[in-house]
Image: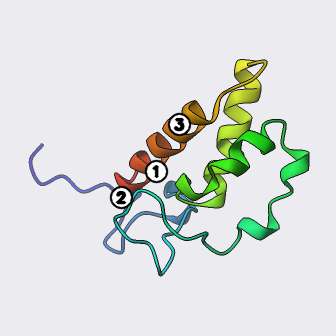
Amino acid sequence: MEGSFDAKVGATGPHSDQVSTCALSAGDSGSEVGEEPRGYEAIAWNELRYGGRIHMCRLYAHCSDDIYMLDAFLSLAELPDIDTESVKLLLRALKLLRLCDY
């Protein structure tokens, strides 16, 4: 039906449980590698299974949630190890999805 209206979304936009909690930093530019956004200092890198590898590529992450998501994904995949180029690629893919509102 053309012009249909989703009652869940409403006139004010999507409800908070329908959107990502990852917010852009004020200094976010279009560059591939940016400055370290606030919040990365709170990450317990030694508690993440792949924290050492991800820490080396942390500037490619869009937000700190992507670091936790990547660590969980890699843990579920049960990889014995991963190189930094693969970590960088996966963080860039997550950043692309975030910027496309996925």
Q: Considering only order in the chain, which callout, 2 or 3, is on the residue closer to the N terminus?
A: 2
Q: Considering only order in the chain, which callout, 1 or 2, is on the residue closer to the N terminus?
A: 2
For the residue marked with disc 1, what is the amino acid? Answer: Lys
Q: In this view, does 32 lie above or below 49?
A: below
In this view, the mark in front (2 or 1): 1
In the image: residue 20, left or right of residue 81:
left
- In this orientation, which residue lies closer to the viewer: 86 or 73? 86
Taking the spot 38% from the left edge, 71% from the top edge, the residue there is 29
Name the residue beneath numbered marker 2. Answer: 7
Name the residue beneath numbered marker 3. Answer: 90
Taking the spot 78% from the left edge, 37% from the top edge, the residue there is 50
Identify the secondary structure beneath mark 1.
helix
Identify the secondary structure beneath mark 3.
helix
Mark seen at residue 32: none
Residue 7: image quadrant is bottom left
Label 2 and label 1: CA atoms lie apart by 30 Å
In the image: residue 31, left or right of residue 95:
left
- In this orientation, which residue lies closer to the viewer: 52 or 64? 52
Residue 22 in percent (x, y) is at 56, 62
Taking the spot 12% from the left edge, 43% from the top edge, the residue there is 1
Q: Considering only order in the chain, which callout, 1 or 3, is on the residue closer to the N terminus?
A: 3
Identify the secondary structure beneath mark 2.
loop
For the residue marked with disc 2, what is the amino acid? Answer: Ala
Asked if disc 2 and disc 1 are in contact, CB closer than 8 Å, the reply is: no
Residue 102 seen in the current view:
no
Name the residue beneath numbered marker 1. Answer: 95
Label 3 and label 1: CA atoms lie apart by 9 Å
